[in-house]
Amino acid sequence: MKPQVSMLLMTWFGVLGCAWAEFFTSIGHMTDLIYAEKDLVRSLKEYILVEEAKLSKIKSWANKMEALTSKSTADPEGYLAHPVNAYKLVKRLNTDWPALEDLVLQDSAVGFIANLSVQRQFFPTDEDETGAAKALMRLQDTYKLDPDTISKGELPGTKYQAMLSVDDCFGLGRLAYNEGDYYHTVLWMEQVLKQLDAGEEGTTAKAQVLDYLSYAVFQLGDLHRALELTRRLLSLDPSHERAGGNLRYFEHLLEEEREKMLSNRTTEAESATLEGIYERPVDYLPERDVYESLCRGEGVKLTPRRQKRLFCRYHYGNRTPQLLIAPFKEEDEWDSPHIVRYYDVMSDEEIERIKEIAKPKLARATVRDPKTGVLTIASYRVSKSSWLEEDDDPVVAQVNRRMQHITGLTVETAELLQVANYGMGGQYEPHFDFSRSDEQDAFKRLGTGNRVATFLNYMSDVEAGGATVFPDLGAAIWPKKGTAVFWYNLLRSGEGDYRTRHAACPVLVGCKWVSNKWFHERGQEFLRPCGSTEVD
């Protein structure tokens, strides 16, 4: 079997080559891995067929020889008395058996190994596996999902059943442990024990789990439970050297703790948790709880009084001729600051064409470091994006003109059309679109001023998660394919409207595509005149 690489494989090499690693940051790019795996399965089955044909020949030869030798060994001299039998014995041993040796030594795996080796260059990396695992944990936290729910694949809006095995859960727990994330280590190692106790089989031993779990709970300050788990580990594996050392160390610490309690130097509040329930560590984001509540659809401050101020209408723009003929449906999403949604902004055909153009250009989305002004990747923005120019395709210019007609703002000083595809648990944590006074002027080189407004197109529906939320407002806007939302980032005075701090919630189930246009101040002077006060 000659080494060969399929045409299917070659067609997606170009796409993978421009998106080296970081597959987890774009579901759009991860779809290419599905076809890669299908090609590998095809190649593997071809190898199996060749091996089966080879074994069939060998088996047939063995059966034939077994019957023949049974007859010849019963009466060797009588058998060889026939000159034809004598000739055939010599021929078999000189020609046929060496030919069989060649058949047995024939390496049928060459073609499959060649295909696998070529494709392996474009496989996900350790970084991808880590990113994908962290994405599952992010979804677990944001949407308050317990490990058992994720392990059973019981997620809203899913079309396919997917479950995590004992070994899968252990892998998640071990990865969290290696990252120093003991909170998630405990959650996932406990899930492993639960599935093992339920009788599920795997390569992971209970002693391995207890080893990680005991040290993780110790790191979370639960000395009593760490001691209990270590004793369980030693009952399963009395020769476990590290566990023996840990046991003595934990007992020593516990004795010290008892002495302190006796001398009243430790209050009840300082003692370790005994219930095995641990608080999620506080992180860098001050509005974490509000942000995640909104992502779950909780805490939305759309009061009846505010709701009465929200209306639907036909939008004619600034009486633009195109909109007079075919106005857009406009719906108020929030009253102050005014956030509106437009319907039927992009057709399915336009969306598919935009995605087709953008996909080969997708690269990990970056953020601007507020101190240095340098673009860099960040864990709080998980997506891939590309920038499309009007020369790329007529549909880009068409969409740009439409956004100009709807907003009444000029696109001449706006940024290019940005297209983004979110990956596993894809998100963009709370941020401002405009440049603040306390950071480097991010748009100075453009010479077009600050970002005055944001026009966000939803190019896909999302089965679960993926909302656009405004933590300071208590507002949540859910993706609807073909619609777009619009808001001003700056007040009429030119000052930033800090109420527009917003976020893209993690995508729980689905594939989220968006495109956006950032309009800048220059050129809008007569289209959106300045106000007379700072708060206008």
Image (tube, helix red, strand yellow):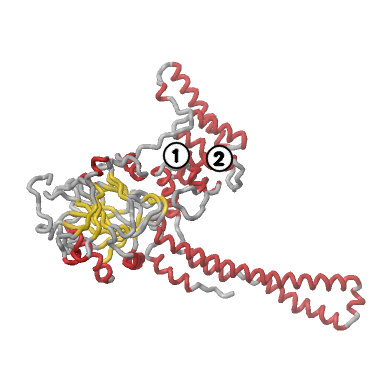
User: At label 1, which amino acid type do we have?
Assistant: Tyr
Q: Going by the picture, which residue comes out furthest to the bottom?
A: 83
Which quadrant of the figure contains the N terminus?
Answer: bottom right
In the picture provided, is 30 more to the left or to the right than 231?
Answer: left
The image quadrant that residue 270 belongs to is: top left
Q: Report helix, strand or loop for mark 2.
A: helix
Q: Where is residue 63, by image quadrant?
A: bottom right
> In whole angstroms, how far apart are the C-alphas of marks 1 and 2?
18 Å
Q: Residue at x 25, y 58 (%)?
A: 329
Q: Quadrant of residue 195?
A: top right
Between label 1 and label 2, give the one nearer the viewer.
Answer: 2
From the top left corner, tell me how far across and down residue 184 is, in percent: 45, 41
Measured from the top left, where is residue 107 in percent x and y? 62, 70
Residue at numbered disc 2: 194
Question: Helix or strand or loop: what does disc 1 sit on?
Answer: helix
Q: Is residue 370 above or below residue 257?
A: below
| Left or right, residue 450 beside residue 125 | left
Residue at point 39% right, 61% down? Answer: 28
Give how far across and how far down residue 498 sits, in percent. Answer: 20, 45
Q: Residue at x 53, y 30 (%)?
A: 227
Near mark 2 (Cα within 10 A), the count class, few <14, some 14-19 or many ≥20, is some
Determine the residue positioned at 49% across, 47% down. Answer: 154
Which residue is the site of mark 1?
Answer: 182
Q: Amino acid at mark 2?
A: Lys
Which of the two labelled residues, at mark 1 and mark 2, occupies the earlier sequence position? 1
Q: Is residue 182 visible?
A: yes
Please give the label number shown on residue 455: none
Q: Is residue 284 visible?
A: no
